Image: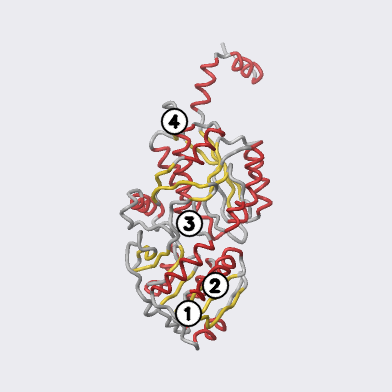
Amino acid sequence: MTFTISRRTFLAAAALAPVTTRLALAADAPLRIGYSMCLTGLFAQAAPSQVNAYELWKDQVNAAGGLDVGGGQRRQVEFVSYDDQSNPANAVRIYEKLITQDKVDLLAAPWSTPIHLALAPVLARHKFPMVGNTAASVKLREVKPGYIWFPTAVIPDKVGEELAAFMAKENVKTAAVFANVLPLAQEIKTYLLPALEKHGIKLVANEDFPPDIKDMTTLISGANQSSPDAFIVLSYPSDTFLFATQAKQLNVKAPFVLSLIGPTIQAYQQAFGTGANNIVTVGHWSPNQSKWPKAKPFYDAYLAKYKEAPDALDSVLSFMSMEILEQAVATAGLDREKLRETIASATFDTINGPVKFDGVQNTTTPTSFLQIQDGSLELVWPEQIKTKDFRPKTGW
């Protein structure tokens, strides 16, 4: 004899089930973490570095039995994600949906400073903590502390000051500065120019360019006539690739060459081979820093999974943010207020060393610079964490 049970009857029976049974069922359910990502639009080129780091973290957590949510309980992790099309307004709508409709257990961060800043009021309104990652701006300090934190050390005022000091140490006397008109590049330039003047470094060129620039030959050749000691290109990935291509064509001979965002991506070295050698870029992590015992295992695991090296900025920051969230949940569980208090006060052990927040900002990781040396990303500034000495660029 066959019996059929209606959905209504099943739900009614479930409602009458013992509380312990229902709690057990909830404990067995996957833990859902929501985020939006710029899979399309202006910032789409950056998405893989962040998504890959999230997926690697999830794989490692699940392989260990799931996320520790306290009390000896572990739950398998799954992501709920949407394409925000690189649009802050879309991201706001998505995170509202994740919180109120999808009812995710935790949140992970999107990409870019504008989207992080747009989300801060949403998180505060819903009292839902989120550890940010790929946001860098002095404006981050204006965010009211409470439900969002920023682990990056790429804060423009510090970058400008430290870059000028680094250049002065390497005996740079003259420099050409080119800057994308997008916010991060312009903020860094605002602080870099007076810092260069303070260190007695003379500007031979100071030009801005649009995000969709297709030809930099006029900029490069004009500055090249003055034979500057340094080319400082405050660029985003697409123009970073363009500059390297045309710098080689125009035989740039400056011993100090910096591109802002892009050289840490594996594709950059693949595209330019030995031409990428001795390029300087922003970044505060290297797999070769022995003071951070988690750094090399992260690098090896990422390389094994994706057959390429991690982006030393976005991939690292994204993985760090999930490490911080993981450790905070193990301490506080899923209670959002306890989670907020833990993130705000604890010190976290990450692939980039210890992290502790003062308000919204990471106060322990130093502002640093990387250099590509024979295919390896080496920290060359500041002295206390460098893995190799700076090497002058001698060719393309």
Of the two numbered discs 4 and 3 in the rendering, the one whose residue sits closer to the viewer: 3
Q: Kindly identify which numbered label has been placed on residue 74.
A: 4
**For the residues bearing labels 1 and 3, Cβ distance under 8 angstroms:** no
User: Viewed as shown, does residue 8 lie left or right of 384?
Assistant: right
Q: CA distance from mark 2 to mark 4?
A: 52 Å
Give the residue number, with chain letter if any, for mark 3.
Answer: 153
Location of the N terminus (image quadrant): top right
Q: Earlier in the sequence, mark 3 or mark 2?
A: 3
Residue 180 in view: yes
Image point (47%, 81%), residue name: 174
Q: Nearer the viewer, residue 67 or 280?
A: 280
Residue 63, image x, y percentages: 39, 38
Closer to the eye: label 1 or 3? 3
Q: Which residue is mark 2?
A: 194
> Whole-Å distance between the Cαs marked 1 and 3?
29 Å
Image quarter (top left, top right, bottom left or bottom right) of the C terminus:
bottom left
Are there few (<14), some (14-19), or many (20+) residues within 10 Å of tag 4?
many
Q: Tell me the kind of residue under disc 4.
A: Arg
Q: Position of residue 346 (x, y in %)?
A: 45, 40
Q: Real-space Cα distance between discs 4 and 3?
A: 32 Å
What kind of element bears circle 2? Answer: helix
- What amino acid type should be assigned to the residue bearing mark 3? Ala
- Are circles 4 and 3 on residues that touch, CB within 8 Å? no
Callout 3: helix, strand or loop? loop
* Quarter holding residue 95: top right
Q: Secondary structure at mark 1?
A: helix
Earlier-in-chain disc, 4 versus 3: 4
Seen at 51% across and 29% down, the residue is: 29
Q: Amino acid at mark 2?
A: Pro
Q: Callout 1, which amino acid?
A: Ala
Rounded to the nearest angstrom, the CA distance separating label 1 from label 2 is 26 Å
